[in-house]
Amino acid sequence: MGDFIYPPGHVMLYLGESDGEPFVIHAVFDLADFTAAGEFYRGILNSVSVTPLTPLYLTPEQSYLDRLYAIKSLR
């Protein structure tokens, strides 16, 4: 069982929630988020990682959630 999440040019596998936050595993080249000071930060990770889904951003204006175009469940 599992759920695949598809933002543009990317595939993530939903792992479940921790404290209400959804977590995914995916191959990540760069990762973007806002710092505690509110500044947009983009860093290079270049790894397979487990990350929370909701704070991930494509641009300062658009999150991964804004751009999801498909979720497919394997049962």
Image (cartoon, rainbow, N blue to C red):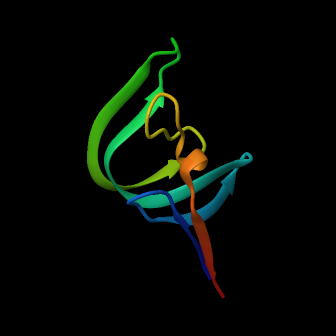
Instruction: Tell which residue pokes out farthest to the top in this image.
Output: 37
Residue 9: percent from left, percent from top: 38, 60
How far from the left and from the top, in percent, is residue 47?
Answer: 28, 54
34, 65: nearer the viewer: 65
Q: Is residue 51 above or below residue 8?
A: above
Question: How far across and how far down the image is residue 18, in percent?
Answer: 68, 51
Is any atom of residue 30 visible in this view? yes
The residue most toward the right is 20
Q: Say whether residue 45 is left or right of residue 65.
A: left
Q: Is residue 12 above or below residue 46?
A: below
Look at the picture and state if 48 lies above or below 30: below
In this rendered view, identify the residue nearer to me: 73 or 19: 73
The N terminus lies in quadrant:
bottom right
Please identify the quarter of the rendering in which residue 17 is found.
bottom right
Q: Position of residue 62 (x, y in %)?
A: 52, 37
Q: Residue at x 47, y 61 (%)?
A: 25
Q: Judge whether residue 53 can be spotted in this image.
A: no
